[in-house]
Image (spheres, rainbow, N blue to C red):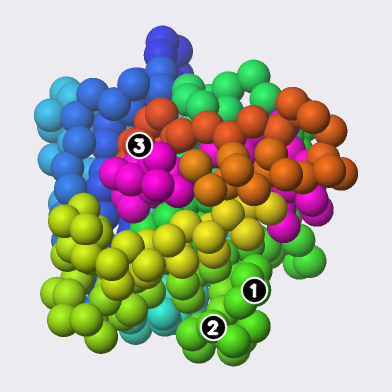
Amino acid sequence: MSGPARTIGIDIGGTKMALAAVESGRILHRVTLPTEAELGFPRAVGRIESAIRGLLASADWRSGDLAGIGIGCAGPVDPRLGTIDNPYTLTGWAGVNILAPLVAEFHVPVRLENDANAALLGEWAAGAARGFSRVVMLTVGTGIGSGTLIDGAIFRGAGGAHPEAGHLVVDPRGPDCYCGQRGCVEAIAAGPAIAAAGSALGAADTRDVFERAARGERESIEILNRAAEALALGVWNLVHSILPERVVLGGGIVDEHYDRFARPIREMLDRATVVPGGQVTIARAVLGNDAGLIGAAQLPLQ
Ligand SMILES: [Zn+2]
């Protein structure tokens, strides 16, 4: 293949799936679908395949024009096997293989990566982490994803698995978490955790908690302060264990309410005495929700 790199990027989250035709890191066409994981994996794959065919038609590409398809998905995923094993936020998707049907259908390389790593790759290739070699990114949405980039490579753990920094414990007496622990960052600061805390006050959902806080309702402000403090403690722990040059904060919730989350992180790090002064910078993910999509589209080119 010659000419600009053409790929399809797919970002699969707990509530929605975004797909895009991407050329040289630029989104040309996109489509968004509700994930509806509970309606079954085969149905989702069929809708992904239809959406890809639609994108190819919109871009006037044939599948032979593609350098590949990249998928970022809410973890845990196994990039080597192409399996998604996330019964928590993708109900019923346990051990499903997403690479095989797409390879069979489109006959191009297909790569799978944790959505947090995909977002990190996107920000590194074209956003807030560009030019940095040691980067940590936290993505706050339905869950809290984390990714670490060391000298340009995604950091992996035992067996090639993805470390889940969303389960750093920041309050040993905090709410129960599905991971088997309690008081994880995700159990306090992710969207569903904020909604669960708000429901005790009669709040309808996560957005309602933010709206009530914006109107000055004290209890809602306290829920969000607690979420922001949990995230800040998570960043504190990551900064002291990894010492990245840049911490990127992304995901739907942080994207909409950046200052509320970034301010306590900066205040906390300003008090740090064992972190080299001025070496760690905090930045907002500039690609917003497109980071995962652009990063996924980079995967076949890695
Ligand atoms: Zn947990």
Q: Of helix, strand and loop, which one carries label 1?
A: loop
Q: Is mark 1 within 8 Å of ligand 1?
A: yes
Give x and y (percent) for residue 10.
34, 46
Specify whether 175 is left or right of 288. Answer: right
Give x and y (percent) for residue 258.
39, 41
Establish if 185 lies above or below 174. Answer: above
Identify residue for label 3: 288
Name which residue lies at 16% across and 23% down: 60
Q: Which span is picked out in magenta?
A: 237-262
Query: Callout 3 environment at 10 Å: few (<14), some (14 to 19), or many (20+)?
Result: some
Identify residue for label 1: 169
Is residue 135 or residue 3 the one in the foreground?
135
Are the residues tagged 1 and 2 within 8 Å (C-beta)? yes
Name which residue lies at 23% across and 24% down: 28
Label 3 – label 1 distance at C-alpha: 26 Å
Q: Is residue 34 visible?
A: yes
Can you tell which of label 3 and label 1 is closer to the viewer? 1
Q: Quadrant of the N terminus?
A: top left
- Quadrant assignment, res 106: top left
Q: Of helix, strand and loop, which one carries label 2?
A: loop
Give x and y (percent) for residue 253.
34, 52
Identify residue for label 2: 174
Say the numbered circle drawn on residue 110.
none
